[in-house]
Image: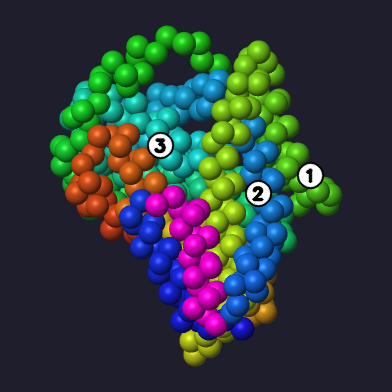
Amino acid sequence: MMSAIGVLIGLGLAIFLIIKKVPIALCLILGAVVGGLCGGVPLEQTIDQMFAGVKDITPAILRIITAGVLTGILIQTGAAETISAAIIKKLGRNNIFLALALSTMLLTAVGVFIDVAVITVAPVAISLHRRYRIPASKLLLMMIGGGKCGNIISPNPNTIVAAENFKVALSSVMAVNVVAAVVGLIFTVTVIKWIYKGTHDGVLSIDPESVDPEIDNRRLPSLFSSLAGPVVAILLLAVRPIFGFVIDPLVALPVGGLVGIVCMGRTRETLSSVSLGLSKMTGVAILLIGTGTIAGVIKASSITGIIVGWLSASSFGETLMAPLSGILMSAATASTTAGATIASASFAPSILATGVSGVWAAAMINSGATVLDHLPHGTFFHATGGTMGLPFRRCMALVPYETAIGLVLAVMTFCCYEVVKLF
């Protein structure tokens, strides 16, 4: 068995290289090799463990690639814009913060990547910033908070891979986090909105002509047709808990996307939409290969046993293993997807051995992975800040508030599990 110290050295090297802007997948692969060698295992055996880790998450990678069909169609056709614009218009001027958070939450919940959801809603936020002089950083914080809430109830890569590693239905993992997501949304638009005052930094270098939604004349689909694809996908995923048989996400998500593009009358854009979606998933798939390698090394080491020993001293310790592993791995990788992948692949056997059900274990890891996925050594930090033209120091000022939102989500999922255990 590999020593825990050796694996931590490899993980530390990976984090250092990520901070230095080396491609994340390559950092994780190199960290896995170094971790195995420093852990006292020969190179050949280390590589075997890395292959085993990748093999374990291959089904999840296939599901994520096919999920790109739905994602690409929502983005390419303008369906995502239609959904967000409808919410903002319906809620009106007096509920700007709720409208932005809810829009980003719902876009993420139906399968749009959280950073893409923020980018989609950002033009409206920038327009509101200019019109009402609301601090751009505060508007961004509302969108990020809403996106985090949607991310734990979505058919996005982090949820798919957690469900796959625990061998449970994706729809079940999405469903049990609904309460946590709603509480997180309320927390974002009440507590966070109240305690964070913001400044007027941001949106200084962005061309108004490129972001004002009022000058976008391209034909957008109706709200009904825009919602058709996500609704069909979610209904297909819900077939198992309702009727007792399984429609795999590998089928449900692409079918939902294709139904949506037919309802929108945009079938001519099918190939370009699918290509767009697959191109966005390619980077995620490569990232997951890297996370699989280091997850395989962690799983083969003594580190899981040490953590179990530490947590067993607390009455809640064994249950806390799921959210804590998600938090730690998201901090290491600054990614919800990578954090959920490494945590679920490495700790699933130990967590299940404590008696926690697979559905709740996956849900708690998924929520935990939102706590520190916004750290500056990840892409999310820079992608979201760039949409609002915020300088680095202003993005750093948002980190404690984003962390608070993630903690609320993780704590609420844990509390819901403890309540369910009583019945």
Badge 3 crowding class, 10 Å Cα cut-off, few under 14, some 14 to 19, many 20 or more, is many
Q: Secondary structure at mark 1?
A: loop
Of the numbered discs 3 and 1, the one sitting upstream in the chain is 3
Q: CA distance from mark 1 to mark 2?
A: 17 Å
Q: Which residue is mark 3?
A: 118
Q: Residue at point 76% right, 52% down?
A: 241
**Tag of residue 364:** none
Color theme of the render: rainbow
Magenta part of the chain:
22-40
Q: Residue at point 46% right, 81% down?
A: 5
Tell me residue 175's x, y (percent): 62, 52
Please say whether residue 228 is visible from this viewpoint: no
The amino acid marked with disc number 1 is Ile
Q: Secondary structure at mark 3?
A: helix
Q: Which callout, 3 or 2, points to the residue nearer the camera?
A: 2
Q: CA distance from mark 3 to mark 2?
A: 24 Å
Tell me residue 273's x, y (percent): 60, 24
Tell me residue 407's x, y (percent): 40, 62
The amino acid marked with disc number 3 is Val
* Quadrant housing the N terminus: bottom right
> Count of labels shown?
3
**Tag of residue 247:** 1
Tell me residue 401's x, y (percent): 29, 55
Of the numbered discs 1 and 2, the one sitting upstream in the chain is 2
Q: Residue at point 61% right, 27% down?
A: 275
Q: Which residue is mark 2?
A: 61
The picture quadrant where one finds residue 45 is: bottom right
